[in-house]
Image (cartoon, helix red, strand yellow):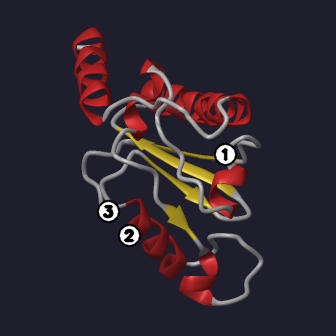
Amino acid sequence: KARPDVIAVVHCHCLDVIPFAATSVPLRPMYHMGFFIGAGVPVFDIRRAAGITDMLISTPDLGRALAQTLGSSSAALMRGHGAVVAAPSLRLVVAQAYYLNVNARLQMQAMAIGGGRVTYLDPQEARKAAQTRRRKNA
């Protein structure tokens, strides 16, 4: 309801994404298939919305709180849980859920070998990759 542009949503327990929701390290786009996270990936911490819970989005109020955290982003991380990805088509949301996890794995690998120096996609690169992707899907 909060996002008329969204037709499909994936909730996943992507193992490589979970550490980014539990630390202060932001998930950032590493390569062209991560373009959709170029604007950043917010983190939903259910404790802020409801205190200590079972970590599940089990009420309309929690759903609204998660949607508010997602905002206009393509994905939101869920602390201690996984992620939610939103897109204008089923095909795109499945691809973005997959690439969200791949991007997280690549970022962790780059951070491990990069000695603290990692070159991420520039915001303009992410926007241009998104434009190219839209043209290919049109």
Label 1 neighbourhood size at 10 Å, few (<14), some (14-19), many (20+)? many
Q: Which mark is residue 82?
A: none
Q: Find residue 44 and report its image quarter.
A: bottom right
Find residue 71 and report its image quarter. bottom left
Q: Please give the label number shown on residue 17.
A: 1
Do labels 1 and 2 touch, CB within 8 Å? no
Residue 6 drawn above or below residue 64: above
Q: Position of residue 15 (x, y in %)?
A: 77, 43
Residue at (54% x, 84% y) in the render: 49
Q: Name the residue that disc number 3 marks.
A: 1
Query: Can you identify the residue that label 2 sits on?
Result: 68
Label 1 to label 2, Cα distance in Å? 20 Å
Residue at 30%, 14% in the rendered image? 137
Determine the image quadrant of residue 115: top right
Q: Quadrant of the N terminus?
A: bottom left
Q: Residue at x 69, y 32 (%)?
A: 105
Mark 1 and mark 3: span between their CA atoms? 26 Å
| Comparing labels 3 and 2, the label whose residue is closer to the camera | 2
What amino acid is found at the position of numbered circle 3 in the picture? Lys
Q: Nearer the viewer, mark 1 or mark 2?
A: 1
Q: Amino acid at mark 2?
A: Gln
SS category of the residue bearing label 2: helix
Looking at marks 1 and 3 on the same chain, the residue that comes earlier in the sequence is marked by: 3
Q: Earlier in the sequence, mark 1 or mark 2?
A: 1
Mark 1 belongs to which amino acid?
Val
Mark 1 touches mark 3? (CB < 8 Å): no
- Where residue 103 appears, x then y in whole percent? 58, 31
Q: Mark 2 or mark 3, which is nearer the start of the sequence?
A: 3
> Is the C-beta separation of discs 3 and 2 under 8 Å?
no
